Image (cartoon, coloured by chain):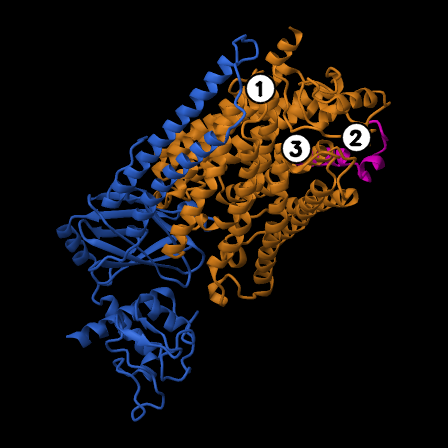
Chain colours: A blue, B orange
Amino acid sequence: MSLWLPAATSNATEVDHLLWALLLLSLAVLALVFTLLFRYIIKYRASSNLDRGVILEKTWYFETAWTIATMLVFFVLFVWGANLYVRLFQPPTGALKIYIIAKQWMWKAEHVGGQRELNAVHLPVGRPIELVMTSEDVIHDFSVPAFRIKHDVLPDRYETLAFTVTRAGTYSLYCTQYCGLDHSRMIGQIVALPPVEFQAWLARYGTSENLAAEGESLFMRFGCSGCHGGNGAGGRQDTSTVHAPSLVGLYGSPVPLADGSVVVADDRYVHDAIVRPQQQLVAGYAPIMPSFAGQIGEEDILKLLAYIKSLAAQAAQ
Amino acid sequence: MNASVLTTGTVVENSQIEGSYLTDGYTIRSWLLTTDHKRIALLYLGAITIFFFIGGIAAALVRFNLIVPEGLLGSAEAYNRLFTMHGVVMVWFFLVPAVPVTLGNFLIPLMLGARDLAFPRLNLFSWYLFMLGGAVTLWALFAGGLDTGWTFYTPLSTMYSNSHVVLAAVGIFISGFSSIATGLNFIVSIHRLRAPGMTWYRMPVFLWSLYSLSVLLVLATPVLAITLLLLVMERVFHVGVFDPAIGGDPLLFQHLFWFYSHPAVYMMILPGFGVVSEIIPAFSRKRIFGYKFVVWASVSIAVISFFVWGHHMFVAGISLYSAVLFSILSYLVAVPSAIKIFNWLGTMHKGYIHFDAPMLYALGFIGLFTIGGLTGLWVAALAADVHLTQTYFVVAHFHYIMVGGMVSAFFGGLHFWWPKITGRMYPEMWARIAALIMFIGFNLTFFPQFILGYLGMPRRYYAYSPDFQVLNVLSSAGATILAAAYLLPLGYLLWSLMYGERAPANPWGATGLEWQTSSPPPTVNFIETPVVTEAPYNYPRPESIAKQHV
């Protein structure tokens, strides 16, 4: 048994500092309360003949003093915890995305290069990582104590977690949201490798097709190309009976919606546009796209997403 | 020392009455159809004792399973159903009702100087609702069980769980109406039935606590009822409310559930505050320190507790801004609790402290509640919560509040008013031993769980990494001590019913109208309605008595 928990991200070290501060504060308050308690029960025990003197009639200045003192201390803790939390959930720039799909009772990880893992996630040390996570069934939670991070993984939603691992090693991954029968078996390992070794690992487990390529064939198979065009270039009225927006250059760019608002086409938007196309209608297009909810699994949606993303990269070139 | 010339007179008169509420009818009918708040309190006491031991047995089996990493029960299914049963029974059928329906029911009219609650028949009806709800829930739990955890998170509970979700929800739904009826009864009684001269600021803190609690019961419980109804609608009729696969939102359930369940945490602890605020002045022979602050602390807890539910969802996928807001509100709700601790200490300052069993329980309460409260600051700090939530740290934190705090207070109150309720004294030495063992057993059970949580052991795990075994074995060992400490009072309190010494009207020399009538009180409580002429806790100072003699 070890009472020591490794801190393998820079965030983990900062959280530990906060926890140390909380521990010291708690011990100080506890010491104060117990000292007063024991002092009073000994000094003022009924059998003691000590002269009690005059008892306090007005108490408000004591009350005000400890109310204000308590509030000040609490406010410092609040600011400290909130600051760290807000920074933890800021999306990093230039992060390596890894896709996580949770289902009763396993973790699936998909790398952009098409590498797939079960109950394990390999990642490089020293590079910002962004996990894009979703669930195929109930709510799960991706928790890595050594990183001091945790986030629920919800069905039909993309939740993200970002961190940079600072120390190579193998760390425990737990599901910490109760998810049914084998909740306690929904565990895995995070393997943090030095960049060179990570590249070697990617090469060793690389498949002939990366995610985007797999997505392209799905794009044909699910009939997306029927409306959005063979290479996602959009259905034009002269080539297709259906008028559908072009997907080239879509990812990462602003999309004007029918209700007048504008959203940026990120992972969440693309996912939702496939599953609930009526929810965010693109301005100028008829609401004719059917929902693919239940037709396309979360893993396949990720592949389509990778494909649509690759179209944006092509457009940029 | 003219503490109450009039009320002292009442004692004489009342003790002249033959018999008490206990001797007013011996038939089963006279109990099951009674509208006497004191008898109904005893009916409730019997019921919640049974629920406490059912929930306790489930907890014991959970701790038994966790002695070895691979699980001793041999079945994750059984384990999941046991911790669900433990949570459901303890929360809804012990912790929330325990103090209000037993001590509250018994004492509110006595402390008010009234003959009964405002609606005696509603009071009896609420007991029947409670029993019906309890029976339906137990049926669900024993006919195959429930495996969703007491929190019923969707879509697990609505679409994936293969257990008696609907039946359990119906049981909790029914018992919720019992809570609402009780809360309403208390609110009306406190407004309308105060004895002449009993102004709001002359009420004991216990009444203020129960008043605050009643407001929570009446306002929050309907939200639980609505939530459970929606849950059943989705599970049975596939109306998409929570499951995204049929158009629902899984987080909506958590918002609704915690909108009830966070105030519910304060429903559990507020009456505990009330009990301790009676015991400490009584055994310090001193007026409570900062009465108005203590009273308004209870009221502000009741109000603020409605605005902190989001702190259960810091990692659930709510917006950053709302998380920040809920964090600061959670710190705010902790302020009144901190105030209370200092006020209890201030009450003991320059007192004449006696160490009877109720006081030992109250001192244990202060210690354990302080630890529970302080660790609350850890999980209210957003970044710390990300690491600690959903681990054993949280389990330890809320058990310190609910079991260390609330159950200690319940036992303290039970011992304090036992002579009044039964007319018998319990064996003092046994009671002190039980209080001490409870404190030690509790800490041994739950303190290791803080460390387990920091190390990352998740909640609700049937099997765990061998790294965590030593601390789990310690925790399970503590649980056996705790079990013994809970069985002891069951033994000696029952014994005292038959063989205990007869209790005088006021064995502790305490203030409060309930001590001005005989023990046990007559059915009508007071032959002559008492008149209140002074603030509560007007304990005479021995110095002033001495001076009078000189």
> Which residue appears at 60% of the width and 40% of the height?
B96
Q: Position of residue A305 (x, y in %)?
A: 30, 69
Give how far apart the Cα atoms at labels 3 and 1 are.
19 Å
Q: The C terminus of chain A appears in which quarter of the rendering? A: bottom left
Residue in the picture at 20% in, 45% down: A166
| Quadrant for the N terminus of chain A in the image | top left
Disc 3 is attached to a residue of which chain? Answer: B
Q: Secondary structure at mark 1?
A: helix
State the residue in front, B116 or B43.
B116
The amino acid at mark 3 is Arg
Please tell me which residue lies in front, A137 or B365: B365
Between the C-alphas of marks 2 and 1, the distance is 27 Å
Can residue B63 be seen in the rendering of this structure? no
Q: Is residue A244 left or right of residue B161?
A: left
Look at the picture and state if A262 lies above or below B323: below
Q: Residue furthest top?
A: B550
Q: Nearer the viewer, mark 3 or mark 2?
A: 3
Q: Nearer the viewer, residue B40 or B1?
A: B1
Is residue B38 within the magenta segment?
yes
Question: Which residue is the site of mark 3?
Answer: B202
Q: Range of the magenta residues? A: B23-48
Q: Which residue carries the number 2 mark?
A: B525
Residue under label 1: B284
Label 1 crowd bin: few (<14), some (14–19), many (20+), radius 10 Å: many
